[in-house]
Image (spheres, rainbow, N blue to C red):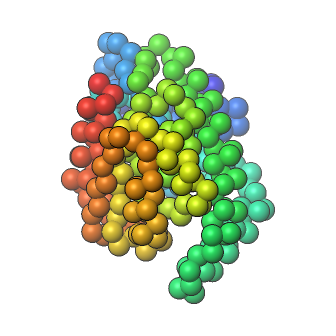
Amino acid sequence: MRFTSEQRLDDGVLEREFALGEIPGILWTPGSVSAPVPLILLGHPGGLRKMYPRLVARAQRSAADGFAAATVEGPGSGDRPRSAAAEQARADLRRALAAGAPVNGEIVDRLILPLVEKAVPEWQAALDGLLSLPEIGGPVGYSGGAISIGIRLAVVEPRISAAVLFAGSFVPRAMFEEARQVTIPLHVLLQWDDEGNDRQLALDLFDAFGSKEKSLHASLGGHTGVPQFAGDAAARFFAQHLK
């Protein structure tokens, strides 16, 4: 991991861009750090520059609560090399949605399972580098999507203590068995009218999670319409479990 730039935001948060090999990422830390702080990993569907306004808002809220936040670009997103197989699966998915047809599970598997296999080790490598910094001490939370990446991380990464998961993406049926292995505290957000999400599948997935402490927070609205109060509740969840 090497830092490539830094700037102070208006609220004093320090924003530093970094490269993990060829993978770009961003780290945000509170303006005043007197001791190592917990860390929240900010998941997103890909396209770091496109997602930046939403990511920086989430990071600034995390910093206000005393947490560092970090994200990395996903495989095949932004300026990273594209996968022909993933691009074909994405095109097939878009065609099915445009036609109003049910999304074939085979399409979801082709799109999501290779993404999980590649993205999770990259997140773990980023976590190695981030936790080596003197200003970051853990514990660690994961926040966001794609939810399948969050599921896998919750199963295989013991350094993650709690997760806020966004039920806003298609999930391969194979991930349900992994969901049963999740034991960390979970706070799951569901947009009830999400046009690109299978609501019943999201409810079934929540039921499958093995965590003894899990809560589902459903709000009216589409994919990008998560209300402020839902974000506030997620922040309180992290304040409870990472402080």
Q: Residue furthest right?
A: 84
Q: Position of residue 159 (x, y in %)?
A: 49, 26
Image quadrant in which you'd find residue 106: bottom right
- Where does the image place residue 28, in percent across and percent down from the top left? 42, 32
What residue is rendered at 21% in x and 53% in y?
229
Q: Is residue 125 above or below residue 179?
A: above
Residue 105 in the image, given as x and y percentages of width and height:
63, 70
Quadrant placement of the N terminus: top right
Foreground pick, 35 / 218: 218
Left or right relative to 37: residue 236 = left
Query: Which quarter of the picture shows residue 15?
Result: top left
Instruction: Classify the position of the C terminus by image quarter.
Output: top left
Vertically, is 179 above or below 134?
A: below
* Looking at the image, residue 155 lies above or below residue 179: above
Q: Residue at x 77, y 62 (%)?
A: 85
* Picture residue at 30% right of the left edge, 49% below the top: 215
Residue 52 seen: no
Q: Is residue 173 visible?
A: yes
